[in-house]
Amino acid sequence: MTGNAPNQRPIISLEMSFADLAVEFAGAIAILLAVLLIVQFWAVLPDRIPIHFGFSGQPDAWGDRVTIWILPGVAAIIFAVSTAASRYPHTLNYPVPITEQNARRQYLFARSLLAWLKAEICWLFAFVVRQQILVALGNAQRFSMELLLGIIIFIFATVGLYLFKAYSAR
């Protein structure tokens, strides 16, 4: 098999490593944390909360407090879809051709990438929920753009590391 078409790729059963399970757990914890933060502060949240922040970190759009549930909901959907996709690694897109010789390693890299990305995105969303609450309650004046930038850089570094490993293991 030399093609990159998903229907020509080997189908391999992959075991979950302890590290993969830990990263999966970390993503689930982030969603749970965001939900618990909302529940904890729901009674004291004002009717209008910040829903968008400008580059300076200052809120520039406000909405009904029920909109704070959007991010944990989206995080849960991302988590579920990524988890389902990782169970079928032969159907994913790869930067290198998948062969019988490299399939196992490439599939493991891709599954690990999905686990890390969903955990990072879930933590990013939990952080945004926390910042929305802090600003809405007046405990912070602005959104921490520096920390947000750090998380985004971390996400890009994860993808870069994956690409490096995938190309190195062609």
Image: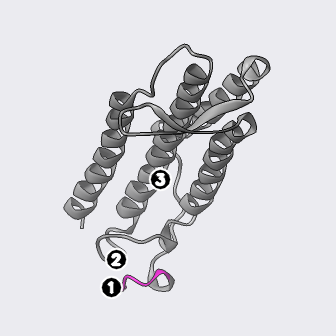
Answer with the quarter of the image where residue 147 lies: top left
Are the residues flagged by discs 2 and 1 in contact, CB closer than 8 Å?
A: yes
Helix, strand or loop status at disc 3: helix
> Which label is found at residue 2?
1
In the rendered image, the vertical position of residue 163 relative to residue 91, given as above or below: above
**Predominant SS along the magenta part:** loop
**Where residue 4 sits in the image (x, y, percent)?**
37, 82
Answer with the quarter of the image where residue 102 lies: bottom left
Q: Residue at x 56, y 66 (%)?
A: 88
Mark 3–mark 1 distance (CA, rounded to whole Å): 24 Å
Q: Nearer the viewer, mark 2 or mark 3?
A: 3
From the image, tell me which residue sits under label 3: 114
Q: Nearer the viewer, mark 3 or mark 1?
A: 3
**Where residue 8 sits in the image (x, y, percent)?**
46, 85
Q: Which numbered disc, 2 or 1, marks the residue that appears first in the sequence?
A: 1
* Mark 1 crowd level (few <14, some 14–19, many ≥20, 10 Å Cα): few
Residue 50, visible in the rendered structure: yes
Q: Single out the residue that lies furthest toward the left.
A: 168
- What are the residue bounds of the magenta stretch? 1-6
Q: Amino acid at mark 1?
A: Thr
From the image, tell me which residue sits under label 2: 99
